[in-house]
Image: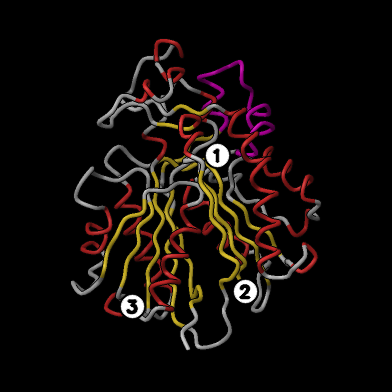
Amino acid sequence: MSNARIAAIEYYLPEAVLTNEMISVEFPEWSVEKIAAKTGVHSRHISAEDEFSSDLAIAAGKALFARHAVRPDEIDYLIVCTQSPDYFLPTTACIVQAGLELPTSTGAVDINLGCSGYIYALGQAKGLIESGQASKVLVITADTYTKFVNPADKSVRTIFGDGAAASLVTNDGNAESMTALTYGSDGQGAKHLIVPNGGLRSGEQLQPKSDVGLRSVESNGFDLFMDGPEIFNFTLRVVPETVASILAKNNATLEDIDLFVFHQANAFMLEHLRKRLGVPSEKFFVALDQTGNTVSSSIPIALSRAEEKNLLSPGMKVMLLGFGVGLSWGGMLLEW
């Protein structure tokens, strides 16, 4: 019997670091303490000028191979989740396949999703394995959102960081370890988080407020725009509903869950969600102080850090939940 499970997770962060002190020098009205209080972030890693998503993805994959008993020639499918691809085409997954020296018999595909992307990628990996199409799937999340951020927009510059994570999903004949997968999307909210420039279509058609003239910034060619209040309201509406749906699908209660690992959006939002859900703080893992919001990689990086802190042990029930750009969301129960 085929049952998919996560066998290993590793992550990679670029060397360059942007601290709150560095941001505060540029924006004196935002003190170090104010930035930390609003976001929960003290520093974030920034990709170099010549470092792109495929580079981060390859580094994360190599870290996984180096630290676990896995060889590149064992991988038969590669999923790369990114919203900051190196090129419109070719697919970033094909570049990563070559960079990791995976067999040419390896399937390789991109998923263009952000904060919920890890859940969607795991769902696809689970389907590939349990339908017999693959036995070892490498799921890599990689984003360089900081390249999209306008340097003069402190509202998003304080939040986002770059990073990548590699997860090995394998066939386990034992009981299912990924259950109650739940997805959702609402394209009516697409305009609330958008990179309006750099694509084939002007983002101002979808979101007039993203116009750099109205924002009093000089365009950097991408100019990521986020309507913070709209994203916050969306999250407070969707996350409790999704948590309830996941629990219902598994005939479980909040008390049955050992650890909650949500998309690491910002500390203020996560604390609001924790209180609304009634989850004890010791069961609600937050780990974004040194990374910021790494988009699709935030959940696997948090899982890896929870393991580093000995907060995860075999058999624990973990709820994963991603939410954000799209608008899109997804969650599951994971037996560690």
User: At 66% across and 78% down in the image, what residue appears?
Assistant: 315
Q: Is residue 49 magenta?
A: no
The 10 Å Cα crowd at callout 3, few under 14, some 14 to 19, many 20 or more, is some
Q: Callout 1, which amino acid?
A: Ser
Point out the frontmost of discs 2 and 3: 3
Q: Nearer the viewer, residue 136 or 62?
A: 136
Calculate the distance from the C-alpha at mark 2 to the C-alpha at mark 3: 23 Å
Q: Callout 3, which amino acid?
A: Gln
Residue 34's x, y, as percent? 67, 26
* Residue of label 2: 335
Residue 283, numbered circle: none
* Residue of label 3: 133
* Residue 114 sits above or below residue 130 on the image: above
Q: Is residue 27 magenta?
A: yes
Calculate the distance from the C-alpha at mark 1 to the C-alpha at mark 3: 41 Å
Q: Where are the magenta residues, as a range?
A: 20-41
Q: Callout 2, which amino acid?
A: Glu
The 10 Å Cα crowd at callout 1, few under 14, some 14 to 19, many 20 or more, is many
User: At 28% across and 32% down in the image, what residue appears?
Assistant: 199
Number of marks: 3
* Residue of label 1: 43
Residue 216's x, y, as percent? 44, 11
Q: Quadrant of residue 275?
A: top right
User: At 41% across and 14% down in the image, what residue appears?
Assistant: 217
* Residue 57 sits above or below residue 84 on the image: below
Badge 2 or badge 1: first in the primary sequence: 1
Q: How is the image coloured?
A: secondary structure
Q: Quadrant of residue 35?
A: top right
Point out the frontmost of discs 1 and 3: 3
Name the side, left or right, on which 295 lies relative to 205.
Answer: right
Residue 268's x, y, as percent? 69, 37
Residue 278's x, y, as percent? 81, 51
